[in-house]
Image (cartoon, rainbow, N blue to C red):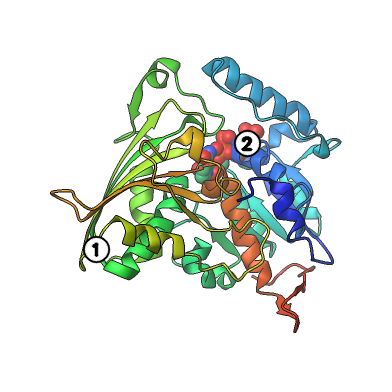
Amino acid sequence: MSNDLNDLYAANSNQAERQKVAIVGATGMVGRRLAALLIDHPTFELAMVVGSDGRAGRAYRDVWEAKERALREHYGNFWREYSWPDALRDMPVCALEDLLKSDISVVFSSIPERAGDSEEALLRDGRKVFSNSPYRRFDSDVALVVPEVNGTELGATLLTKNPNCVTSGLILVLAPLHSRYGLREVVVTTYQSLSGRGDAKYATDLVVGNILPLHGSCELTETLIWKEVKKVLGDAFPVSVTCNRTCVQEGHYVEVRVKTNRPVDGVDEVASLFRAFNPLASFKLPTNPVSPIVVLREKGRPRPMQDANHHCGMAVAVGNISTDDEVFDLRLAYVVNNLQRGAAGGVLLNAEVWNAQNVARTQEGRITVTVATSKMES
Ligand SMILES: NC(=O)c1ccc[n+]([C@@H]2O[C@H](COP(=O)([O-])OP(=O)(O)OC[C@H]3O[C@@H](n4cnc5c(N)ncnc54)[C@H](OP(=O)(O)O)[C@@H]3O)[C@@H](O)[C@H]2O)c1
């Protein structure tokens, strides 16, 4: 199993022409991660980074390093700065106006919900937008996609969303269980990392050496997860969600308990089901993990520090599987990397799958890609 991005990209570098893309919200936590993922990407070429209005004209490097330094100074020495990648040197932070004047037709969005008018401006202008933002995530004319589960919805709309960071992993875990056993009830409890809040900083007394319940807070994470599960997997089973913040930098730890319609034979059966779940296996896509679910049988796993980076953070790590609970048919825990699978890697994989809809396979099974170079009709 390779965790090296360069190995993954080298194995997928058979596209003749790279498509120019931009990031709005590029100066934020998710935007910075996405910019790093796009370096040497075989399908997409990062041509412009856009920040909020006040940032335009500044060197991307200065904003990046100031934000990383501010997080470490705030949280203390346990916080690791995400280093500036020199390959992005000379990139200035641009304004949305610059993007609207350009011919870049594919845009990744990592802006907060309140800045949704930026996405609207791009859509009005016919750009394809892959977005992390909760803005319009639940509108019926907006696709909400976890590509292994409902990737066929990708081509349908100009605006494609990926779910919240917790849900991006939860859908991967629930989808095979639902299809095999039929889910009857689902209970979810999260222990979410601090980077899930982006560059916004919690008061340290709330989260360092502490657990912060998010129930009833302005973050609305419990509601988002609940609604996202319904939108992607349907309304066949009730879902109860409790969210907490914990003093981990990256990687959300999530406990899941389910009741099923059909009996669960045992832990081995569930582990095999997860290992076999790989709907995108036949797609040769740069950000596609070798398998989206990694099963761990060791006691005390998964843990965010050890398990948030399987397959470059694109696989969820599942462990603690048990079928001997007195109340539930099945219990498990998973770790999802909130910045990779849960955000930057999630939009990127969606875009890769969408791009592959323009793919024609040659007789040898190699892939040639027809890149859309003009803006699409809305
Ligand atoms: N962090 C995660 O783990 C995670 C996971 C899944 C989804 N998300 C979602 O992804 C989005 C970005 O999250 P984040 O953690 O990267 O947040 P962040 O660190 O606060 O970054 C927000 C970005 O949006 C820009 N921005 C803020 N207000 C704006 C405005 N009015 N107009 C245009 N741009 C504006 C910021 O620019 P400035 O640099 O000028 O402030 C920054 O680039 C959010 O919608 C969040 O809910 C985050």
Res. 110 mark: none
* Residue depicted at 77% across the width and 33% down the height: 60
**As rendered, which of 206 and 333 lies closer to the eye?**
333
Going from N to C along the chain, the mark reached first, 1 or 2, is 2
Question: Which residue was labeled with disc 1?
Answer: 265
Res. 28 mark: 2
The mark lying in front, picked from 1 and 2, is 1
* Residue depicted at 20% across the width and 65% down the height: 263
Three-letter code for the amino acid on which mark 2 is drawn: Gly
- Label 2 residue SS: loop
Q: Position of residue 173 (x, y in %)?
A: 39, 56
Up-down: is 36 above or below 157?
above
Three-letter code for the amino acid on which mark 1 is drawn: Asp
Q: Is residue 196 visible?
A: no
Mark 1, other Cα within 10 Å: few <14 / some 14–19 / many ≥20: few
Quarter of the rendering containing residue 271: bottom left
Q: Position of residue 160 (x, y in %)?
A: 56, 61
